Amino acid sequence: MKSITVGALTKFFSNDKVIDNISFHAEEGQITSLLGPSGCGKTTTLRCIAGLETPASGHIAFGDETVFDSERGIDISVEKRKLGMIFQSYALWPHMTVQENVAYGLNVRDTNRMDIEKRVGKALDLVQLRSMAGSYPSNLSGGQQQRVALARCLAYDPEIILLDEPLANLDAKLRDSMRYELLEVQRRTGVTALYVTHDQLEAMSLSQKMIVMEAGKIAQEGVPEEVYREPANRFVADFIGNSNFLSIAGLDARSGYTDVRTALGVVRCPPATGACAWLMVRPEDIQLVENEAPSSANTYKGLVKSRIFHGDIVQLHVLAQGDTHLTIHVRNDVPHTDGARIRFFLPESKVRLLKA
Amino acid sequence: MRVGKNLTNGVLLLLVAYIIVYPILWVFMGSVQNSQGQWTLENFGAIYNVYYLTIILRTLWYGACSVALSLVIAVPLAWVINRTDLGWKRTIRALVIVNFVMPPLFHALAFVFMFKPDAGFINNLFNSVFGIQPFDIYTFEGLVFATACGLYPLIFILVDATLRNIDPSHEEAAAICGSSRWKTVRTVTFPLVMPSILSGVLLGLLEVFATFGPPAIIGIPSKIYVMTTQLYVDLSSSPPRIERGAALSVIFLAIAYLLVFIQQKALRNRSYVTIGGKGIRHRLLPLGGWRWPILAVIALTIFISLLAPTLALVMVSFSKVWSAGFAPENLTFSYYHDALFLRSDIFSSFSNTVIVSLTTMFLAILLGGPIAWAVVKRGGPIANLLKLITFLPLSVPGVVFTIGVILTFIQPPLVLYGTLSIIVVCYLGRFLPFAVQPLSDALRQVDMSLIEAARVMGSSAGHIVRKITLPLLKGSLISAALLVFISCVREIVSIALLYSPGNSTLMMTAMLLWDEGQVQTTSALVVMILLIVVVFYLIVHALPKNGLDRER
């Protein structure tokens, strides 16, 4: 299997810089996801790697084979890049049966007939659709079409597959099971996968490495847990998971920690590095404290404005000092209702200081 | 409320049945009756001979050749425009559309001026350079050529729309799989476009079977008769041999439905909903050095099929001696005066055209609006039947339908033959689909919730129509109306059969002037009709499709 290396990639649409000098590396045999809101350039990046778009500058390599290099004038055409790709619309050819769709990439490669039969069968087994080989795509359900697209893309054993929001058109339940299936198939084949999505949950649960993009640039990259726990800036923290943000009025460095002045009051935080504009804390990291407990650092009073039952958790919208609105996730057996007066605690280890 | 709805549907159904189904039925009935109204098979006997058999086979061959030549021009053109970086695409598309709306006599007349054996401009040009006059328009090949030059835009428009709307990822997926450009075209693009090519072939054949301009102007002088011209001859003989015409019509109706059947059969399981690809553009093949040769071929095609004919026609209309070409001493404006005053019936034919076209237009909208509403918003078996009947004329060659209209309204209870009304009834039946189609498309885009929201707020039905439905549909209503209007103005085949002295239209008068040998006057009149039609089409084109478009 091959890794993907992208260096200093830039792409314009008319005069809009949609990809702005980005570089990253996707390890071989892993799933790497490109995550970001719509218009952040993630799909364009994927299409540049596929060879469906031509970048303005930069270089792209699969393993040690350069497929695009603006300086050296290398631009391997899409059909020679030996990739697999799954499109958001699946792009199954409506005039071909499932069998013919899956066999297409093998036919193009002049594989012999016996071999094609065998490999198509194998690919369809992988997605448990051998019984549908004779059907036309229009007779399949969304999930089945998705699996045919996967089989078609794996049939000719590409070393890299590109996935462009493959689960976006499925309903929630099906998306969960297809996500698991994708992961299974990737593990079994060991193929290198680059996965584009706007769904943070999908990216976090599927990939070993997550690249968050914003306005054509990489905002942060890393393993999902690290990105979730240590977001690089407010954008990443906001885009991935739920967050409470408090504007920082001032920092006072102490020994081993920092006192941060906010509308809520002084919050004791881990030592600050560099200039910080925002204090961030995840809703699930805020703890409720007994009203009778003695007052201590990072404990504040609040008024429950609304209680929203989510099933597994309860979400409390809390109004605290300085007109601060906070969201707190608590266990679903917490009794507080609207109008309840509560006290809550921000654990120093869970609070993060972020750049703008 | 329910009763009211069913009543409206029922009345609509009766109306379209009377103006569409009844005439088509009369084609069959007329073919098995003699002029005294007795049942007989002698009409079929009268056309069961070598002469009529030749006419039938020639018409089929004429259709096949014209459509084949159109395909050869239209399909590669559509592909090049949609899948390469050719440039000039808007201009090429616009010129093809202009070609599409040219009145039916345009190509026939202009090609006579260009390729007449001893005097055509192009022949003269060749004569002065090479000393030969290689072209003869008065041949079967000439007839096919003139027809195809007016027909290829129809097929182009269908294929162009499909190529543009195919989800780009279908072709991208093939490239990802390792398929070359050419192989992708063969294995993915072409099969996906095939249904619209087949529709184009069918529509093209039906169009050629009903075409009158080239067969009348090129075919009759060279004794190459096809169905339309033979019907014209049969009906204008005295006494009119209308029963024989009905028998010939039945045969072409059968052929038309055989073609429709074959097309449906071929398209079974194959109506691909390929619209998708949210604004992602198709990958364009860089033409490199091929760009200029390809542009040159396209420019030549457009020059021969549109620009040169226009030039020829305009030049002739200003010439004292039509074949003398452009020279100051040959210049005259008098034929434009003649075009308006030469025949005493020109003014009446002008007012007839306006009256007939406007009446047909209003009736088509008045009838088409409720039909579109019933089909799109109400549904049910009656609405389905309504839809089926409304679109029936599209699969019936116009000339066959006209025979049916004549047979229907030549006898009680409603005798309209020889009046302007029969022209209106005939046009209404033929062009009703042109009104219903855009209105249905527009209504389909209008979400019922927009109307329901008003109803919930307590608006009356009349208020809703005035304040919500009509404003939303304004653009489509206007373009539907103009489409019908233009179709009436440029119509020639029905009027050629329905014409009676005093009941002519501008197109028919042009035809009559040509028969009298008034070459320049005919040209001047056709140039004027052409201007009217093109200006109206440009208006339709510039209109937003409906009120919803404003937000997009």
Image (spheres, coloured by chain):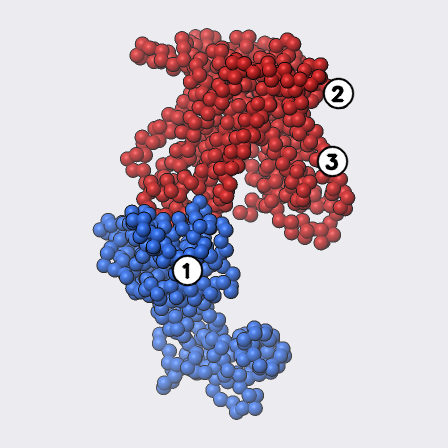
Name the residue type under label 1: Val
Instruction: Give SS at disc 3.
Output: helix
- Label 2 crowding class (10 Å Cα cut-off): few <14, some 14-19, many 20+? few
Name the residue type under label 2: Pro
Horizontal side of residue B275 vs A32, given as left or right: right
Q: Nearer the viewer, mark 3 or mark 1?
A: 1
Q: Are marks 1 and 2 on the same chain?
A: no
| Residue occupying the point 77% across, 46% down | B1
- Output the chain of dot 3: B
Location of mark 3 (residue): B11
Residue B489 seen in render: no
Chain A drawing hue: blue
Location of mark 2 (residue): B412
Q: Earlier in the sequence, mark 3 or mark 2?
A: 3
Location of mark 1 (residue): A127
Name the residue type under label 3: Val
Q: Determine the CA span between mark 3 and mark 2.
A: 21 Å
As rendered, which of B290 and B27 lies closer to the eye? B27
- Output the chain of dot 2: B
Q: Determine the CA span between mark 1 and mark 2.
A: 70 Å
Q: Are marks 3 and 1 on the same chain?
A: no
> Measured from the top left, where is residue B262 in percent x and y?
51, 33
- Output the chain of dot 1: A
As rendered, which of B76 and B343 lies closer to the eye? B76
Instruction: Give SS at disc 1.
Output: loop
- Label 1 crowding class (10 Å Cα cut-off): few <14, some 14-19, many 20+? some
B327 w.r.t. B18: above or below: above
Q: Nearer the viewer, mark 1 or mark 2?
A: 1
